[in-house]
Amino acid sequence: MRFPVGVWLLLSGDLVLAMGVGLTQPYAVVLLHEVRGFSLAVSTGIWALGPVITIVGNAVAGPLIDRRGGRLVMVTGLAIVGAGLLVLAYGPGLVSAVAGVMIGGLGWSLVIPAMGTRLAILAPESIRSRVFTFQYVIMNLGMAIGAALGAVALARMPPDTETGRFVLPLLWVVGAFTCVVAIVLSMFAGRQMPLKSQDDHVRRGGYRRALRDRTLLRVLGASVLLSTVGLGVYNAAPSVLALAADDPAALGWAGVANAAAVVVGAPIALRLANRISARTALLCTAALWALGWAVCIPTVFGMGLNTRAALTVASVLIGFGELLLAGAIPTLVNGIAPDDLRGRYNALASLSQTLGLAAGPLLTSAAVVARSTDYLLYTTIVLAGLACLLLVLNPVRVTPEPSTEVGDKGVV
């Protein structure tokens, strides 16, 4: 693919960073329990604190990016993530474990919108959707590689052994090193130049100005709804359905199907990025995810496909939708973002998906308490429909903005 050099450097750093995430994130609770000595309940609770600080950090990231540039904020965020990994692995006591998770969450809240801002500025508007779609693919690839390496290490040196308890924290050291590699690649990718006349104007407007953009609000609303349906609920509902059917192995097949859909669907999604608009991609995402959960409705009542087959079909449809969503949301947001608020627009986009990721498990938990899993599935279809209404009733206006990022070949 013909991307600018700066884009390739950022994507290469993202691949390395994703490998570090895959190497550590799936085994965080194991680290806290086996190495740090906390109970499973406490370990799970500590790990759940990360998204909380991420929501707060997103609000801070936007103004920092707009005033100081995407490169500085991204490098700072990566350094904070690396520090959080080391504190989590080797800090003594409960306070350090909580601090490590929250430091890491703060770092990610800076890195993600800064990365989105930089890619949007480095990539010409005509290939922006492909760039963001490709970023999602390589991120999943990197996480899969990292998770596989971590699994091999833990299989040979189980964490309940003396050797395993010594080796497991070293995975977090490797994760911190991937942050260093990503920092180096990010530094060479170019830098975002703040507009000379922006400071006073931004101070008077900021998030208030961004949130007066009705087009942005419609995109953010659709993003929250779709993230709830396809990301948040998917993180929790399959476990509920599999356990209710007494078929935990269905989760394994669902995970494989989802990963395979992302890999196999990547070339298709990249081609579609050139042929359909970002708004159409989101409408397709809503349709795919609504269909995926609709397939599971007869299964809840003991009809149609069995649980394993239903979750496999749903996971494939969710995977295809993820690819479309990954390219469409940042493309729409950056297409309407003015240069002096681009950081805030990307921070709000990141926040919208974080809210969806949090809302999905909450809805699932409420459905379990009420013993109404079927109503949860109906709700996902309704939410997907509402997202479509936001996108269809008031078509999203996309106005390309000029680039302000300087790379190794001048303005890209």
Image (spheres, rainbow, N blue to C red):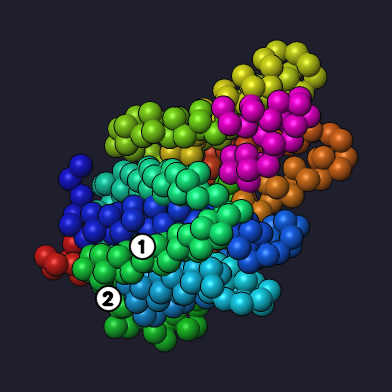
- The percent position of residue 391, horizontal first and vertical second, equals 53, 42
Left or right relative to 192: residue 175: right
| Residue sitting nearer the eye, 368 or 380 | 368
Q: Which residue is mark 1?
A: 178
Does the magenta segment cover residue 8? no
Taking the image as shown, residue 169 lies to the left or right of residue 50, namely left
Q: Is residue 64 above or below residue 390?
A: below
Residue at the disc numbered 2:
193
Task: Kindly report the distance in space between the C-alpha atoms of the residues bearing marks 1 and 2.
Answer: 26 Å
Residue 402 rendering spot, x and y as whole percentages = 26, 63
Name the residue at 36% across, 62% down: 178
- The image quadrant of residue 242 is top right
Taking the spot 79% from the left edge, 33% from the top edge, the residue there is: 373
Amino acid on which the number 1 mark rests in the picture: Thr
Residue drawn 47% across and 74% down? 83
Write the start and end of the magenta stretch as one range. 230-253
Residue at the limit of the structure toward the front, as seen here:
162
In the depicted structure, whether residue 294 falls above or below residue 154: above
Type of amino acid at the residue the image marks with label 2: Met
